[in-house]
Amino acid sequence: MDHRFITLVAALATLTASVSFAHGNASHEPKPHQYVAAQVVETAFGRQGDPRKASRAFTVEMTDRMQFTPPLLTLKRGETIRITAANTGQLRHELVLGTPQEIMRHSDDMKQHPGMEHDEPHMVHVAPGQQGELVWQFTKPGEFQFACLLPGHYEAGMVGKVVVQ
């Protein structure tokens, strides 16, 4: 075999290894969204909340039984809440807020593009054994949902309800 080819392969292997090790053990979990009032976007189910104005906090447990506990949150219109999504399972889970129609549409998108990356203030992705947090202000009355839209989770019943009075 040509020694130039062997040298090239060895150089590429060294370069690849150094890039791989340079990454270290950094988490791929998104960081919590910073609240910037000028960048807040109103949706059909509310808007990102100012953490300093959160009036209540909820912990929602996510399990590998494809359930949220509690499965129902009851709030007042205009209320800003802090949700801690606690993944007590061995699988990755997420908590995504939305209208039933938006949740269904997003679920369909996830089926077509299972590796789709998304990072919005109304969603939190949580590795096994970890917690994530979001702060949301529900500005409109109605019934909304929170769901895990990872492939197969929503279909298995991993969905909860938010009632805003």
Image (tube, grey):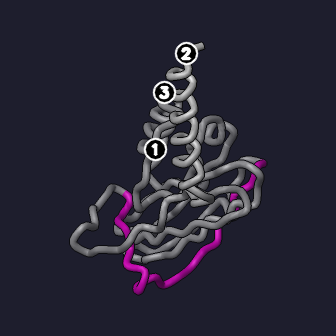
Residue sitting farthest toward the top: 1
- Between circles 1 and 3, the one closer to the viewer is 1
Q: Which residue is mark 2?
A: 2
Q: Which residue is mark 1?
A: 117
Q: Secondary structure at mark 3?
A: helix
Q: Which residue is mark 3?
A: 112
Asked if the stretch drawn in magenta spans residue 59, the answer is yes
Which residue does the image show at 35% across and 74% down from the upper left? 35
Q: Residues within 10 Å of mark 1 (few under 14, many from 20)?
A: few
Question: What are the residue bounds of the magenta stretch?
Answer: 45-64
What amino acid is at disc 3?
Gln
What amino acid is at disc 2?
Asp
Give me the C-alpha separation between circle 1 and circle 3.
13 Å
Residue sitting farthest toward the left: 38
Give me the C-alpha separation between circle 2 and circle 3.
46 Å
Task: State the image coordinates of residue 107 (x, y, percent, origin top left).
Answer: 51, 38
Q: Quadrant of the N terminus?
A: top right
Q: Is 152 positioned to the left or the right of 117 in the image?
A: right
Q: Quadrant of the C terminus?
A: bottom left
Dot 1 or dot 2, earlier in sequence: 2
Asked if residue 101 is positioned above or below residue 12 in the image, the reply reads below
Give me the C-alpha separation between circle 1 and circle 2.
43 Å
